[in-house]
Image (spheres, helix red, strand yellow):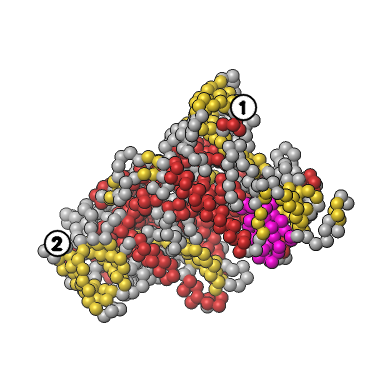
């Protein structure tokens, strides 16, 4: 068998499947393939951050994403719970301080157990794992280079690229030398202190949110809008809440240089920033600068040109068919590196599993990327599924959509008397299709738990009437969705006054 | 789908009104609601929206211990609301323990003061009482703080606390008087020395070492939060916990409570309650497993052995409203009508209905819409989701595994299940042994989901959205 006539391809391969990237998508696919008795190898390697940070098997989610993020978010929520608990009768000393090292150590220990668990799972599933950097060198052939520089060649019938992404840097003086990213934050061996978060992504807002919740002085520098791509009405409410809870925002500025005033853990940094709307220049001192301006796919240095896999030159993302196949028939891709797909762990896992079932188990089901629910774990959490208001208006026309909405006050916040009329529920309905619910949005505690079930209902094609016919569970936040009656169109008041 | 469930109704009440009008007597109100709780208030306010003349009678007979409360019914005053708030107080106790793992340094152990919590909860409830009164006023619904009883099918006699009488007549009457906790009066000292949920939430002082008798969700929820705020708490159950609920889930709930610190006296029933010189209560009980008699002393004994409708004083026999001879509850048809034309009943007082606030509210609103708004939509009581707010919460919708097996046969059922560990428990080093979920499905074809059961934090939030899907699932199956 020969491909491209460039180099002879072996008649029998070392592996049925080689997965490059041991993250959410890669590991799920590998374990699934092993179930069908395929010979599988996973290559996983983490290039250290500019600050020298690295981590174990499991990918972004486990090491520098979802998991540590949610745990630190929980730490911040517990800070709020402590304050609330006094009103519920609990008594303890007035001053409560947070210890960054205690939290980080606990979080890192847990992550370590997950890394270990993944290694054991691969072994139990008879999947070969190598902690080595994989890159294509020719048809069906990959070179794996380990930490010590030892190179090995492997061949496989099929390949799955699941190398994910890494945080982007600004490209300004001092960024790589002095700034950190989410790749560094969750294992930072010292408290970050007064922090500037650059960016308006969910990464930026989630990190800024929990840092402030732990008692740190936090500023977010935003170039233009918050949470681009998300419903802007909700994004602005999130920003408002964070502002009211002590996060500073510098809007319409971008940093132009970062200088070190003093070394240390943390040190002192001076940030110079320029306005995007005028000539104004500002300078401010921070202990830590966290860059969260976006992530770039790890596709530039894995030899894709050697096997002819097309990538989007501008973004680095890989375009695939609806069966996750690249332009090279034996090479597939899943996860964050895919063009025009959602960068979420459950999506990568689902896509990876279904792909493998199609390849080896005769299945035909394709991954459904529509109506994928998600949650932003900002101090006031935001759960969403389906269209944002803007995209619904764009697609269907304002006169053809009906938006029902309401504020609500979680019962648990009444006794501590806080944040009345901050939580908010909104659904977007398609008038021309039986008022089918095409967009679901909730701002409030446990937003993810609330959203999950409704996402299943949206998949079933739930209409407003069916929603109204569902009995609520009392007293919980989610029940607000079963009694929505005020439309945005009516302009009526949605503020709540009681039970 | 929903259309199949609707029936043409609404002609009956109009006919009666015409007859009365012909006979020359005009009733003072279009609608009189007896009982200002979840169902009653919802019905009254909805009727008022149609421009109708509506009146509400609400009255709370003091409990045997003398506790009473304002407008709003059980849910607001001695049910869902104070229960969930005290449950939250207990959860915060756990959060305080978790917090140090997450880096917050608080000196342990932390102490809880009952009176701070009770006062905060009671103040909030009072604000709701006030809110309800304002709402009725805003909607021009006439409110009488009076105890109602029937004189004739269109006439109700209202009596104030002071004994002043008012006669109210109405075209339509809705009975929504709810229920009150039962006392096991056959047990010596039960009525004299015991309290119920009617009293617990209004106690000014801590209940101290408490025995709760009963296996209902009321019993378990109360025992749960009392344990959580640091009180020595025991639950005495004669047989199974949470009768009517999925029993595997019920066991997980009680197992968790045991590891949480609640003591369980299983297969025991009390025989007497006596007061000691120290003012403590001595309870004697029979252990049916061991055949022995045991005794212990408590500061508080709370009965949670069921609730019964308050129909005796309504004078239902006078007007012929039929009740279930065993339960005392009012028998209604699918449109909430009683055996007497233009007299309806909703909420906890009705036979065969779930005893839940949201169903009472929905039934009340739909009834008003049928009476006054040209609607014919009936209330759908199928697959109502619910949550038990024990320390580890249990949310469910649809059939229990037992009911599914009974209905379809065990060969035709497939149960998907999983134990899991909430991420927040990991760093906190909390035990997740009872965190579990299961989906009871039909085995054939598309495997329709018959029931969904979840134990874990925020169970209500988790289940709510899935309730929608289950609704259609079950409806299609029964067609």
Q: Residue at x 42, y 52 (%)?
A: B428
Q: Secondary structure at mark 1?
A: loop
Horizontal arrangement in the rendering, residue B217 relative to residue A377 (left or right): left
Q: Which mark is residue B256?
A: none
Chain letter, disc 1 residue: A
Q: Report the number of discs.
A: 2
Assess disc 1: are there few (<14), some (14-19) or many (≥20) residues with their C-alpha within 10 Å of its C-alpha.
few
Question: Residue beneath label 1, please?
Answer: A173
Question: Is residue A20 shown in magenta?
Answer: yes
Residue A475 appears anywhere in the view: yes
Residue B53 appears anywhere in the view: no
Residue B191, compared with residue A227, is above or below; it is: below
Furthest-top residue in view?
A279
Q: CA distance from mark 1 to mark 2?
A: 77 Å
Furthest-left residue in view?
B277
Q: Position of residue A379 (x, y in %)?
A: 46, 42
Question: Residue beneath label 2, please?
Answer: B279
In which quadrant is the N terminus of chain A drawn?
bottom right
Of B168 and B289, the residue lying toward us = B289
Q: Residue at x 80, y 62 (%)?
A: A12
- Residue mark closest to the camera, 1 vs 2: 1
Q: Residue at x 49, y 40 (%)?
A: A189
- The range drawn in magenta is A15-44
Of B395 and A46, the residue lying toward us = A46
Chain letter, disc 2 residue: B
């Amino acid at each position: 068998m020969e491909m491209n006539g460039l180099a002879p391809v072996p008649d029998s391969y070392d592996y049925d499947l080689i997965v490059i990237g041991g993250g959410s998508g890669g590991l799920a696919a590998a374990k699934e393939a092993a179930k069908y008795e395929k010979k599988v190898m996973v290559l996983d390697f983490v290039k250290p951050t500019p600050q020298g940070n690295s981590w174990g098997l499991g990918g972004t989610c486990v090491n520098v994403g979802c998991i540590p993020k949610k745990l630190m978010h929980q730490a911040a929520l517990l800070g709020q719970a402590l304050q609330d608990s006094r009103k519920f009768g609990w008594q303890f000393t007035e001053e409560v301080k947070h210890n960054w090292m205690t939290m980080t150590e606990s979080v890192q220990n847990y992550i370590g157990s997950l890394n270990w668990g993944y290694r054991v799972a691969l072994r139990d599933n008879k999947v070969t794992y190598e902690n080595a950097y994989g890159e294509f060198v020719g048809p069906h052939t990959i070179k794996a280079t380990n930490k010590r520089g030892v190179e090995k060649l492997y061949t496989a019938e099929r390949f799955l690229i699941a190398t994910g992404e890494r945080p982007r840097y600004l490209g300004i003086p001092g960024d790589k030398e002095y700034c950190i990213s989410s790749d560094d934050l969750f294992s930072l061996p010292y408290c970050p202190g007064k922090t500037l978060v650059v960016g308006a992504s969910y990464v930026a807002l989630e990190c800024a949110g929990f840092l402030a919740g732990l008692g740190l002085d936090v500023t977010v520098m935003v170039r233009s809008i918050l949470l681009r791509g998300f419903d802007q009405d909700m994004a602005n409410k999130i920003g408002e809440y964070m502002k009211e809870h002590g996060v500073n925002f510098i809007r319409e500025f971008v940093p132009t240089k970062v200088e070190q005033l003093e070394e240390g853990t943390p040190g002192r940094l001076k940030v110079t920033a320029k306005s995007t709307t005028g000539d104004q220049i500002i300078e401010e001192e921070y202990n830590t600068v966290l860059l969260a301006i976006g992530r770039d796919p790890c596709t530039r240095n894995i030899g894709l040109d050697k096997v002819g896999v097309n990538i989007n030159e501008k973004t680095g993302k890989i375009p695939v068919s609806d069966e996750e196949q690249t332009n090279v028939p034996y090479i597939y891709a899943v996860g964050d590196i895919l063009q025009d797909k959602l960068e979420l762990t459950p999506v990568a896992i689902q896509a990876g599993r279904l792909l493998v079932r199609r390849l080896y188990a005769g299945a035909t089901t394709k991954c459904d990327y529509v109506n994928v629910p998600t949650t932003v774990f900002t101090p006031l959490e935001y759960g969403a599924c389906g269209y944002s208001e803007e995209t619904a208006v764009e697609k269907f026309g304002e006169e053809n959509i009906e938006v029902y909405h309401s504020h609500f006050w979680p019962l648990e916040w009444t006794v501590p008397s806080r944040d009345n009329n901050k939580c908010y529920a909104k659904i977007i309905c398609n008038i021309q299709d039986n008022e089918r619910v095409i967009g679901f949005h909730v701002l409030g505690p446990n937003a993810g738990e609330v959203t999950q079930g409704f996402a299943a209902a949206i998949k079933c094609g739930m209409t407003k009437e069916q929603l109204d016919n569902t009995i609520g569970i009392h007293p919980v936040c989610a029940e607000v969705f079963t009694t929505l009656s005020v439309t945005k169109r009516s302009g009526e008041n949605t503020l709540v006054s009681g039970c | 789908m929903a259309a199949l469930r609707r029936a043409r109704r609404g002609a009956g009440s109009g006919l009666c009104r015409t007859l009365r009008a012909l006979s020359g007597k005009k009733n003072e109100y279009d609608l009189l609601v007896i009982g200002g709780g979840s169902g009653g208030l919802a019905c009254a306010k909805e009727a008022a929206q149609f421009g109708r003349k509506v009146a509400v009678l609400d009255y709370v007979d003091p409990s045997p211990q003398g506790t009473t409360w304002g407008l709003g019914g059980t849910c607001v005053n001695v049910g869902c609301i104070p229960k969930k708030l005290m449950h939250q107080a207990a959860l915060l106790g756990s959060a305080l323990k978790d917090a140090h793992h997450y880096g917050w340094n608080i000196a342990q152990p932390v102490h809880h003061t009952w009176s701070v919590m009770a006062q905060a909860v009671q103040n909030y409830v009072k604000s709701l009482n006030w809110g309800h009164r304002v709402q009725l006023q805003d909607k021009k619904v006439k409110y009488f703080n009076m105890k109602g009883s029937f004189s004739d099918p269109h006439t109700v006699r209202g009596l104030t606390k002071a004994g002043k009488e008012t006669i109210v007549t109405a075209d339509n009457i809705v009975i929504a008087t709810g229920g009150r906790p039962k006392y096991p009066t056959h047990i010596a000292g039960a009525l004299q020395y015991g309290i119920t949920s009617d009293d617990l939430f209004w106690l000014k002082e801590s209940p101290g070492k408490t025995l709760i008798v009963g296996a209902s969700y009321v019993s378990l929820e109360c025992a749960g939060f009392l344990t959580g705020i640091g009180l020595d708490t025991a639950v005495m159950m004669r047989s199974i916990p949470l009768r009517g609920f999925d029993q595997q889930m019920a066991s997980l709930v009680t197992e968790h409570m045991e590891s949480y610190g609640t003591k369980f006296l299983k297969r025991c029933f009390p025989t007497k309650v006596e007061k000691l010189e120290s003012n403590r209560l001595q309870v004697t009980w029979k252990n049916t497993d061991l055949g022995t008699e045991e005794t212990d002393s408590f500061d508080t004994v709370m009965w949670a052995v069921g609730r019964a409708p308050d129909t005796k004083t309504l004078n239902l026999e006078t007007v012929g409203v039929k009740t279930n001879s065993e339960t005392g509850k009012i028998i209604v048809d699918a449109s909430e009508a009683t055996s007497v034309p233009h007299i309806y009943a909703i909420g906890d007082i009705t036979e065969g209905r779930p005893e839940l606030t949201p169903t009472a509210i929905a039934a009340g609103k739909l009834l008003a819409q049928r009476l006054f708004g040209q609607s014919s939509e009936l209330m759908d009581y199928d697959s109502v989701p619910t949550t038990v707010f024990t320390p580890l919460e249990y949310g469910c919708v649809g059939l229990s595994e037992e009911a599914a097996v009974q209905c379809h046969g065990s060969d035709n059922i497939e149960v998907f299940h999983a134990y899991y560990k909430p991420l927040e428990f990991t760093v906190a080093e909390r035990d997740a042994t009872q965190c579990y979920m299961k989906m009871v499905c039909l085995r054939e074809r598309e495997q329709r989901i018959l029931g969904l059961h979840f134990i874990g934090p925020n169970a209500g939030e988790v289940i709510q959205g899935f309730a929608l899907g289950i609704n259609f699932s079950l409806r299609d199956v029964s067609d």
